[in-house]
Image (cartoon, helix red, strand yellow):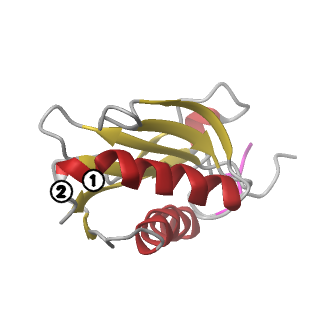
């Protein structure tokens, strides 16, 4: 029998929590903008896991507003330090020295996290859930 997962609502709340807690740890504290142009939805599970066709994953992404581009490198260093302090495993990092930070990692509970910098200098933080059953349990008949 497939394992129980968190629900879609729980995964959404956790992804938002990761983004918001990261933002709150920064100086200056950014205004988080969950802009509609960013991936902020649930979608089909693309992972190669059993029952993936019956599962969903959640993405939450926010722009870090009110951060001057001149502080991107410093803010990137703060995010890296915060994520390491939280016990996240960091898979890649670049651009911290040249003001175009990019960081990827994973939380202890399997959410992927990333910091990206757009060409215009705006930074965004994303958190994506592992694949979950929408209601926390597999649909009947599986």
Q: Measuring from the top left, give residue 121's x and y in whole percent.
A: 18, 41
Q: Which residues make up the magenta segment?
A: 136-142
> 13 and 1: which one is in front?
13
Residue positioned 46% across, 43% down in the render: 114
Q: Answer few, some or many: residues within 10 Å of disc 2's Cα (few below 14, many 20 plus, some between 14 and 19).
A: some
Disc number at residue 71? 1
From this viewpoint, is residue 50 visible?
yes
From this viewpoint, is residue 133 visible?
no
Q: Measuring from the top left, give residue 9's x and y in whole percent.
A: 51, 69
> 4 and 57: which one is in front?
57
- Residue 133 is left or right of residue 13, and the answer is right
Residue positioned 45% across, 66% down in the render: 16
Residue positioned 74% across, 54% down in the render: 108
Disc number at residue 68? 2
Q: Residue pushed farthest right?
A: 1
Disc number at residue 61? none
Residue positioned 22% across, 60% down in the render: 67
The residues bearing labels 1 and 2 have C-alpha atoms spaced at a distance of 6 Å
Tell me, yes or no, whether the two marked residues, 1 and 2, touch with CB atoms within 8 Å.
Answer: yes
Name the secondary structure under disc 1.
Answer: helix
Q: Residue pushed farthest left?
A: 120
Q: Residue pushed farthest top?
A: 48
Name the secondary structure under disc 2.
Answer: loop
Q: Measuring from the top left, give residue 142's x and y in whole percent.
A: 74, 42
Q: Answer few, some or many: residues within 10 Å of disc 1's Cα (few below 14, many 20 plus, some between 14 and 19).
A: few
């Amino acid at each position: 029998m497939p394992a129980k997962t968190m629900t879609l609502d729980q995964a959404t709340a956790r992804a938002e929590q990761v983004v918001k807690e990261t933002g709150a740890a920064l100086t200056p504290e950014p205004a988080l903008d969950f802009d509609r142009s960013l991936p902020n939805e649930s979608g089909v599970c693309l992972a190669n896991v059993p029952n993936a066709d019956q599962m969903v994953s959640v993405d939450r992404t926010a722009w870090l507003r009110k951060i001057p581009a001149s502080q991107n490198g410093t803010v990137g260093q703060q995010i890296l330090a915060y994520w390491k302090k939280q016990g996240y495993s960091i898979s890649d990092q670049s651009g911290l020295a040249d003001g175009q930070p990019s960081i990827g990692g994973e939380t202890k509970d399997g959410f992927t996290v990333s910091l990206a910098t757009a060409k215009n200098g705006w930074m965004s933080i994303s958190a994506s859930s592992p694949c979950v059953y929408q209601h926390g349990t597999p649909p009947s008949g599986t």
